[in-house]
Amino acid sequence: MLLSLIVGSLVVMGSPGPSTISVTAVGAAFGLQRSVGYLSGRIAGTIAVLLAAATGVVALLLAVPRLTPVLLAASAVYILYLAYRIATAPPPSKPDAAAAAPSFAGGVLLAVANPKAYVAIAAVFAGSPLEPALKTLVLAVMIVLIHLVWLLAGAAFSRIFHDSLWSRRVNIAFAAALVATTAYAVL
């Protein structure tokens, strides 16, 4: 049962989506060290979504019909802003102090406004017969590991693409992937 929960969380929560693509893109655009604040915010926000799903708050929020469009609009605005920041980030070899990496607060905001997070976490949580406290603990650990792996993958790109032209291409590709995966998750 525990293995099923771990595998299920890897497949559902670890698949490409707004959260994982954004962490990878930030890692590629800003490097590992400058992305830690954003990563921490993503993890904290996603664990908050997990706790909301575990305690039934998600079910209550989804029962309020006027709240869902507000959450989706806030998510869309922030994702477009983040995509712009990623697309216009300077090459990692030429850090620009004026181009600050996305913040802890930005990571939290995207996590709690990410529609895929609620659906994925609720599905994985509800699909396991384990005790709720154990499910919550295992999924919290998986959230940390999944986000960390995606950030390390993105940071590996930052080390590879120090050329200005390639860096711009990669950043634009990640920004486009972020917008596309979010649109897919919403639709």
Image: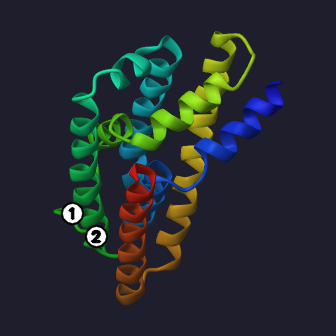
Q: Nearer the viewer, residue 30 or 122?
A: 122
The amino acid beneath tag 1 is Ala
Q: Is residue 128 visible?
A: yes
Label 2 neighbourhood size at 10 Å, few (<14), some (14-19), many (20+)? many
Q: Which comes sooner in the sequence, label 1 or label 2? A: 2
The answer to whether 63 appears left or right of 88 in the picture is right
Quarter where residue 29 is shown: bottom left
The amino acid beneath tag 2 is Ala
* Residue 91 position in % (x across, y down): 34, 76
Q: Could you tell me which residue is drawn at 21 percent across and 52 percent down?
A: 77
Q: Could you tell me which residue is drawn at 27 percent across and 27 percent down?
A: 65
Q: Is the C-beta separation of discs 1 and 2 under 8 Å?
A: yes
Q: Is residue 26 visible?
A: no
Q: Measured along the vertical axis of the image, is residue 15 above or below residue 138?
A: below
* Residue 28 position in % (x across, y down): 44, 66
Q: Nearer the viewer, residue 13 or 30?
A: 13
Residue 28 — which label? Answer: none
Q: Nearer the viewer, residue 3 or 30?
A: 3
Quarter where residue 176 is shown: bottom left
* Residue 130 position in % (x across, y down): 74, 15
Q: Could you tell me which residue is drawn at 56 percent across and 54 percent down?
A: 150
SS assignment at label 1: loop
* Residue 159 position in % (x across, y down): 51, 72
- Residue identifier under label 1: 99
Q: Measured along the vertical axis of the image, is residue 45 above or below residue 76?
A: above
Could you tell me which quadrant the N terminus lies in? Answer: top right
The answer to whether 149 appears left or right of 70 in the picture is right
- Residue identifier under label 2: 89
Q: Measured along the vertical axis of the image, is residue 113 above or below residue 91?
A: above
Q: CA distance from mark 1 to mark 2?
A: 7 Å
SS assignment at label 2: loop
Q: Residue furthest left?
A: 98
